[in-house]
Image (spheres, rainbow, N blue to C red):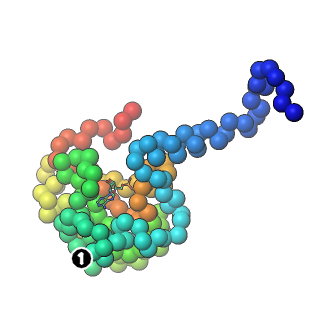
């Protein structure tokens, strides 16, 4: 039975779904589905397929631990992604499970990619998005290297 008349005022606890739904809609509008950084690794995600050569990419670097390629939708004049070869969903997953050799290899690869592109003197920014609030869209750890102009404040206020 539905009663006519104005809706009753919200009770304590009601409306708590609004924020998560709004965040989800914002992420979808920004062009990607949010990634759960704790989810099991999907071996068919796009960044798993790039090192296997199943998806084309503009590769700029590779070694035993890492692969780097140009971002398909750059947000700076220089926008390269560096990924570990291992199967890690996120920075959280990588920092918890990767071996010391994988971590050292990956960190050195990120530095080598930036140095080889001549970015040290003008400067550059490293960025890793983790999980829904971080805006992560692809469920394989990747570090963005952004450069080529003054990049402004770290985040829009
Ligand atoms: P994130 O929001 O940190 O997960 O960033 C994902 C990034 O991957 C975005 O900057 C996309 O433009 C980029 N991207 C998605 N698919 C590809 C692809 N096939 N090749 C290169 N970059 C891609």
Q: Quadrant of ligand 1?
A: bottom left
Helix, strand or loop at mark 1: loop
The one nearer the camera, 108 or 145, is 145
Task: Pick whichever, 97 or 133, lies toward us.
Answer: 133
Q: On the image, which quarter does residue 68 sit in? A: bottom left
Q: Which residue is mark 1?
A: 63
Q: Left of 103 or right of it: where is 36?
A: right
Residue at 77%, 20% in the rendered image: 6
Q: Which residue is found at the position 47% from the left and 70% from the top?
A: 42
Residue 85 lies in quadrant: bottom left
Q: Residue at x 38, y 75 (%)?
A: 86
Q: Position of residue 33 (x, y in %)?
A: 46, 53
Instruction: Left or right? Give the position of 24 relative to 43.
Output: right
> Can residue 145 be seen by looking at this rendering?
no
Picture layout, residue 29 above or below residue 2 = below
The N terminus, quarter of image: top right
Q: Is residue 85 above or below residue 149?
A: below
Outermost residue, right direction? 1
| Extreme-front residue of the structure | 1
Residue 53 screen position, x and y as percent? 27, 74
x, y (%) of residue 7?
76, 25
From the top left corner, tell me how far across and down residue 40 is, in percent.
53, 69
Left or right, 16 with respect to 58, comes to: right
Question: Is ligand 1 within 8 Å of the beta carbon of the residue shown at mark 1?
Answer: no
The answer to whether any part of residue 18 appears in the image is yes
Query: Relative to residue 90, is residue 97 depicted above or below?
Result: below
Name the residue at 49% across, 48% down. Answer: 133
Tell me if mark 1 has few (under 14), some (14-19) or many (20+) residues whose alpha carbon lies within 10 angstroms of its own: few
> Left of 34 or right of it: where is 117?
left
């Amino acid at each position: 039975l539905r009663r006519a008349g104005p809706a009753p005022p919200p009770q304590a606890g009601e409306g708590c779904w609004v924020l998560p739904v709004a965040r989800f809609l914002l992420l979808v509008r920004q062009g990607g589905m949010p990634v759960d950084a704790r989810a099991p690794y999907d071996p068919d995600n796009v960044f798993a397929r790039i090192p296997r050569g199943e998806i084309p990419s503009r590769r700029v670097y590779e070694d035993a631990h890492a692969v780097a390629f140009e971002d398909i939708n750059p947000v700076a004049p220089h926008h390269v992604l560096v990924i570990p070869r291992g199967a890690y969903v996120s920075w959280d997953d990588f920092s918890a499970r990767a071996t010391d050799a994988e971590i050292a290899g990956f960190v050195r690869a990120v530095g080598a990619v930036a140095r080889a592109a001549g970015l040290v003197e003008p400067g550059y920014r490293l960025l890793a998005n983790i999980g829904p609030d971080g805006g992560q869209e692809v469920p394989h750890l990747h570090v963005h290297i952004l450069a080529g102009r003054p990049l402004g404040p770290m985040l829009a206020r």
